[in-house]
Each structure stands twice: as C-alpha cells, then as structure tokens.
Image (cartoon, rainbow, N blue to C red):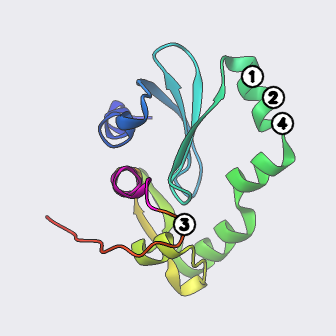
Amino acid sequence: MTPALVEVVREHWGWTGVAPAQVTATSPFGHLVVKDEAGAFWYLDPEMRELNRIADDDSGLARYFSDENVRFTWDAAVLVAAAHQRLGPPGEGRCYSLKPHALLQGDYAPENLCILPIAEVVGWTGDVERQTRHLPEGASFTLKVVD
C-alpha cells in the first residue's frame, strides 16, 4: 500500500492513539489492516467506524484471520458480488463503499453502493467517528460538509 494511505490513517485516525507504519492489507470494501510502529496490527472498519488492535505480531494476525467470522466480514463476498455486478471493478486505490448517508445509517441496499477512493473513505469515517464517538446510541446530529 502507498505511504499516502498510511498518512491518511495517521491524520484521520491518529486521535485513537495508533501510530501507523504500514497498511498491510485492504479489503474490497476499504477495510484495512494497519501495522503500527511497534509492530502490532490494527483492523480499521470504515463501516463501523472502528479501529481495533487485533494482534501483537504476524502469528497473532494469522490467528485472527483464521476466524470464520472475521473472514466473512473481510471478504464480504455477497456484497462484493452485488457491487461488482452493479458498478464493475473498483480500480486501483478505490474500493466499494456505501454512499455516505447510507454508511452512517447502515443501509446496505444495492442502490446505496458506490465506488470511492479508499483514502476518502478512511479519512471521512475517521473524522466522523472522532466527532460523534461520545454521542449516545441513536442520538441525532447534523452533519455539515465543508470543502
């Protein structure tokens, strides 16, 4: 992965305390495995707006990904097939995603699927999570987009 994507993680998810050194894997829906400066691995899930430490080393990462539920989420085979049929391949540096409003609502309807730059998905989900993480479940908020 490009160093630029590492910088996007640093800029938009650094508030979590992660010190990213490398993006080691990217899923078709823009989920990332990030290796930090200490050698630990983190899972960035843009749909859930979560960045969680998943392993301390390579063997721990292999154990983590041997879990069937983890692989199911990472592969997202049914969703990827629907997106591919509707939109075609995402192309270099891009991923399937939900349109921003649908991502916030968790609405996986086919008409809400889109292709976006991975850096954009990672960036804005980190910013949204940083600003909304302390809100109670179900709280209303206004999203203001500024260019």
Look at the numbered discs 2 and 4 and tell me whether their residues touch, using CB distance below 8 Å: yes
Q: Is residue 83 left or right of residue 115?
A: right
Q: Main secondary structure of the magenta part?
A: helix
The mark found on residue 60 in the picture is 1
- The region drawn magenta spans 125-135
Residue type marked 4: Ser
The answer to which of marks 2 and 3 sits earlier in the sequence is: 2
| Residue placed under numbered mark 3 in the picture | 137
The answer to which of marks 4 and 1 sits earlier in the sequence is: 1
Residue type marked 1: Gly
| Residue placed under numbered mark 2 in the picture | 63
Mark 2 or 3, closer to the camera: 3
| Residue placed under numbered mark 4 in the picture | 66
The answer to which of marks 3 and 4 sits earlier in the sequence is: 4
Residue count near mark 1 (Cα–Cα under 10 Å), binned few <14, some 14–19, many ≥20: some
Secondary-structure class at tag 2: helix
| Point 76% across, 47% down: residue | 70
Look at the numbered discs 1 and 2 and tell me whether their residues touch, using CB distance below 8 Å: yes
